[in-house]
Image (cartoon, rainbow, N blue to C red):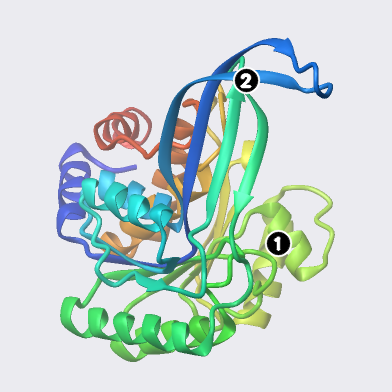
Amino acid sequence: MMDQKALDELFGSFNQTKIGVVGDIMLDTYWWGSVDRISPEAPVPIVSLQKKETRVGGAANVALNLSALGAPTTLFAVVGNDAEGKELDSLLKAEGIKTEYIYESSERVTTNKVRIMGRNQQMMRLDHEHTNDISQNESEKLLANFYKYVDTEKPSLVILEDYNKGVLTKHVITSVIDYCKQKGIPTAVDPKHKNFLAYKGCTIFKPNLKEVKEGLKIEIPSVSLDNLNKVHAALKENLQHEISFITLSEHGVYFGATVEQKLIPTHIRNIADVSGAGDTVIAVASLTYASTKDMELAAELANIAGGLVCELVGTAPINKVHLQEEVKKLLVK
């Protein structure tokens, strides 16, 4: 629990808390239309297109959530030298996110996920992307930009956001975490299966329950504090990190640190869409931890924020005012 003054000070501090985000960014494209008949050419619905919408996705959505909370946010990624990359850059700049360190490569395409929507449901998804690891040249360009940012901006925390699209290679992961450790900057990781155990020495490791089971190749018979403490011990043995932060869907969140472990239950919500909830959770937890170094408070706020965005349809960033009101209702004494 916290008092109103502490809550106001925390949300005010977000505006001065610089965060860097390294990872896979993408464009989410939505083609909305109506479906009235089946094609005479094949047994498929005809979607009569009415509007096109583009949003930022992947690590860019994490940055969008951070910016929505007021944090000065800088992105590091590799995109293609193409129209999608330029549109993504424009969308990010419009939200106040710094994009000057994103590297444009002529060897890759910008990931674009096109969703065709009819009758308010997804009819089809078209993915245009390269998922192979970025080249050595692309890695060195990305890392040079990152080192320059760290030395000049001195961020409060760096997030590594992995979507298995090739930007976070083992070399990039190790280089980013090691450089941040040299500079005394905490790192938070949202992993995927490919390099799950490559994030050695990070500060906060945030998988979901499914990713933990697959990454460690273990069964978790039930969601309990005892079982999750064992998971934390297994993760720590592999990663030598400081804090495990595991999202548990309807069961809430768990965090395990050296002196404290806690299972925090979810708050009852009307769930509309879970898309992007993980991006919101890592953003809120990282920003709160960067501001306070209090992991319990970070987990509590992230748990609330994740539930709030699940009430919205589609990927949407957290609303700062709405989050502050909800935290006041649930956590302020």
Q: Position of residue 59 (x, y in %)?
A: 45, 58
The residue that appears at 71% across and 74% down in the rendered structure is: 234
Considering the numbered disc 2 on the image, is that residue within a helix, a strand or a loop?
Answer: strand
In this rendering, position of residue 262 left or right of residue 279: right
In the image, 326 versus 284, the foreground residue is 284
Mark 1 against mark 2, which lies toward the viewer? 2
Q: Quadrant of the C terminus?
A: top left
Q: Position of residue 76 (x, y in %)?
A: 36, 70
The image quarter containing residue 182 is bottom left
Vertical comparison of 1 with 177: above or below:
above
Count of residue discs: 2
Q: Residues within 10 Å of mark 1 (few under 14, many from 20)?
A: many
In this rendering, position of residue 241 left or right of residue 187: right
Q: Looking at the image, is mark 1 or mark 2 earlier in the sequence? A: 2
Q: Position of residue 97 (x, y in %)?
A: 25, 56
In this rendering, position of residue 312 left or right of residue 3: right
Q: Position of residue 143 (x, y in %)?
A: 38, 84
Q: Amino acid at mark 1?
A: Val
In the image, 106 versus 60, the foreground residue is 106
Q: Amino acid at mark 2?
A: Val
Dot 1 corresponds to which residue?
Answer: 212
Vertical comparison of 37 with 138: above or below:
above
In the image, 29 versus 249, the foreground residue is 29
Q: Quadrant of the N terminus?
A: top left
Residue 47 image label: 2
The residue that appears at 39% across and 45% down in the rendered structure is: 301
